[in-house]
Amino acid sequence: MKYNWSIIGHEKQLNLIESDILSGNISHAYLLAGPNSVGKNTVAKKMSGILQCSNDFCHDCPTCTQVEKGCHLDTIEIIDDKESIKIDDVRKIIERCNMTRQSNYKIFLIQTIERMTTEAANSFLKMLEEPPERTIFILTTNNVRAVLPTILSRVRVVNFAVVSATYLEKKLREMYPTQDEDVIKKVSLFSLGKTGKAVNLMENPEELANYIKVYSDVMFFLEHRNITDRFSYVNDIAEDEGKLETFVSILSNVLRSKILNGENAEDHIRTIIKIDEAMTLIKKNVNLKLVLENLMLSLK
């Protein structure tokens, strides 16, 4: 590839994007679709840098620096803040879209496009149909089925997927040659093939340390059936949504790993089903502590 993407995997997708750029066949709108944490937003940001930089994505000029830091005047990011994108938000995008550009392109990076309300999506659709010259939308979604078909018909969809654990471990060793082998294997397990998640953990020691601590807790619960210890842990994670997400993610990943290794597969499959049921109940605002206690009782 011509450009320095510094991304694990997704060679086919990156080659497709590069081909569009180098051939001048750039679409006015791209939708990067796939599971969360596979690197879609990173690709979107770097694609913006390539398009805006006049020196082959040099990584050193003011333009590259501004795009990377999210403060480039003509590269507008709509970050996923877990809130829906409403009609007023789209009106602001349209207003920015019609402003005079100072750069190669006017680029809009909109994360998790499925957050748009129906009213907002319909308004956005009109802009997609007739965008101003040299305006590019780079959208991402974790669930392409939740995106309006009318929007899908007006964008170039680039599908992303998880990578194999073997490939991820190999790439992490290449990127972090001084890192402990056990850490590489744990990060691969925690990430479940999601390259963006893996890099984030490797680059954030505090978050990695927290994941390793939760991993140790999970392994303890699976090896010891002390209900008192399990319920005490429930009291702790029930007060912090971040801890809950981490715990559930690691527990699910550990169980899937055990299933692949042929360890009590039927029991672990049943537990994973119970985890999914528990998370559904939590989303319905059923008593969090009660749901987690029932989940702990089901651990084999």
Image (tube, rainbow, N blue to C red):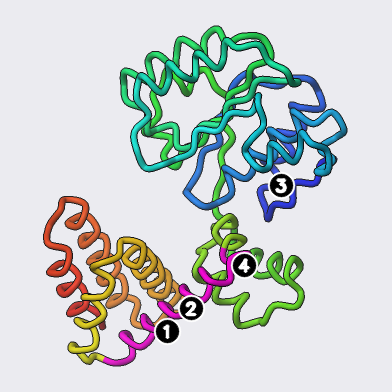
- Circle 4 sits on which residue? 202
What amino acid is labelled 3 in the image?
Glu
What amino acid is labelled 1 in the image?
Ser
Which quarter shows the C terminus?
bottom left
Q: Nearer the viewer, mark 3 or mark 1?
A: 1
Name the N-terminal-most of marks 3 and 1. 3
- Circle 3 sits on which residue? 11
Name the N-terminal-most of marks 3 and 4. 3
Q: Secondary structure at mark 3?
A: helix
Where are the magenta residues, as a range?
Answer: 201-224
Please indicate whether residue 277 sits to the left or right of residue 5 in the image. left
Q: Residues within 10 Å of mark 1 (few under 14, many from 20)?
A: few
Residue at image point 40% right, 13% down: 123
Q: Residues within 10 Å of mark 3 (few under 14, many from 20)?
A: few
Q: Are marks 3 and 1 in contact (CB under 8 Å)?
A: no
Residue at image point 31% right, 18% down: 119
Q: Secondary structure at mark 2?
A: helix
C-alpha gap between disc 4 and disc 2: 12 Å
C-alpha gap between disc 1 and disc 4: 18 Å
Q: Nearer the viewer, mark 2 or mark 3?
A: 2
- Circle 2 sits on which residue? 212
Residue 102: give x, y in percent of width and height: 72, 18
Q: Are marks 2 and 1 in contact (CB under 8 Å)?
A: yes
Q: Secondary structure at mark 4?
A: helix
Name the N-terminal-most of marks 2 and 3. 3
What amino acid is labelled 2 in the image?
Ile
Question: Between residues 145 and 98, which one lies in front from this camera angle?
Answer: 98
Residue at image point 56% right, 71% down: 187
Residue 244: give x, y in percent of width and height: 31, 66
